[in-house]
Amino acid sequence: DAGITQSPRHKVTETGTPVTLRCHQTENHRYMYWYRQDPGHGLRLIHYSYGVKDTDKGEVSDGYSVSRSKTEDFLLTLESATSSQTSVYFCAISRGTQANYGYTFGSGTRLTVV
Amino acid sequence: DQQVKQNSPSLSVQEGRISILNCDYTNSMFDYFLWYKKYPAEGPTFLISISSIKDKNEDGRFTVFLNKSAKHLSLHIVPSQPGDSAVYFCAARPMDTGRRALTFGSGTRLQVQP
C-alpha cells in the first residue's frame, strides 16, 4: 500500500495565526487531495492536485491555500486560522485512472483553533 | 446542496444479522460509487465499489447494490461482526475527463452488538 504520512497529527493554534499541514507520500502518485471531516458533514473536499504545480479548488476552499512543488508533498495552509477551521484534516492519494482503486487516506491531522 | 446523502446517522444491529446502510445521490453524472469504512483516529479505508453500469457487486460479506433509477445505493454486510463497528461513508465520482475528486456523504455510524 502507498505510504502516506500527515504531519503534525495534532495541533492547537490561536485564531489569526497561519498554519501549514503537510502530506507526504512515498510513491509517485499524481493525484492528491485534502478533505476535512466535520460532524454532520462527512468529508468535504478542500483542494486537490493532479501533479506538480497543478492544483484546483474543492467545495470548501475559502480560507485555505495549497502548494505542490514536489510530487511527494502536498501542503495545506490556513493563512489566518479561524475557529470554524477546527476540524480533522485528511490527505488522500489516488492511484490514477483505475476507479475501483479509490483513495488511500492518511491518518489525519486534528486541528484546534482557539 | 448535498449531492450524496446518508440520511441515517447511526445504525445498531446484532452480531450475525444483516446490516444495511443506505445512500442517495442527486447528480446523474456520477459514474462510480464507493464505500469507505472509518475507525476512530484512523483515516477512511476503501471497502467496495460499483460502476454505474452494474447493479450489484459482491466481496465476501459485503455487497453493494445500485438502483440508478432511484439514485440509491446500499451496502449489505452479512453476517455482521463486532469488528464491523465503524463509520461508513459512501462516495461518488463524477463522469469527467480526468478530475476525479470524490464527493462523500455524511456517514453512518454502525454499531454491531455482540
Image (cartoon, rainbow, N blue to C red):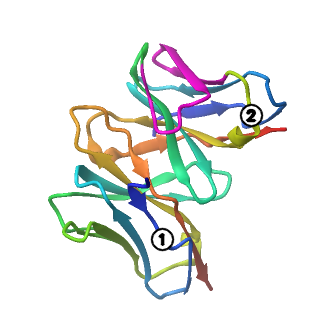
In the picture shown, does residue A46 fall above or below A42? above
Is any atom of residue A56 visible in this view? yes
Task: Pinpoint residue A91: horizontal percent, then vertical percent.
Answer: 54, 36
Q: Nearer the viewer, residue B17 or A81?
A: A81
**Residue at (51% x, 45% y) in the render:** A44
Q: Alpha-carbon neighbours of circle 1 within 10 Å: few (<14), some, or many (≥20)?
A: some
Q: Amino acid at mark 1?
A: Asn
**Image position of A96 (left or right of A36):** left
Task: Pinpoint residue B73: horizontal percent, then vertical percent.
Answer: 32, 68
> Residue B111 appears in which quarter of the rendering?
bottom right
> Is residue B90 rendered magenta in the image?
no
**Image position of B48 (left or right of B30):** right
**Image position of A50 (left or right of B84):** left
**Residue at (34% x, 61% y) in the render:** B25
Dot 1 lies on which element? loop
> From which residue to which does the magenta span run?
A55-78
Q: Amino acid at mark 2?
A: Thr
Question: Mark on residue B65?
Answer: none
Dot 2 lies on which element? loop
Q: Nearer the viewer, residue B42 or A113?
A: A113
Task: Pinpoint residue A61: horizontal percent, then vertical percent.
Answer: 53, 32
Q: Alpha-carbon neighbours of circle 2 within 10 Å: few (<14), some, or many (≥20)?
A: some
Residue at which label 2 appears:
A82
Residue at which label 1 appears:
B7
Alpha carbons under labels 2 and 1: distance apart = 29 Å
**Residue at (49% x, 13% y) in the render:** A70
In the picture shown, does residue B69 fall above or below A34? below
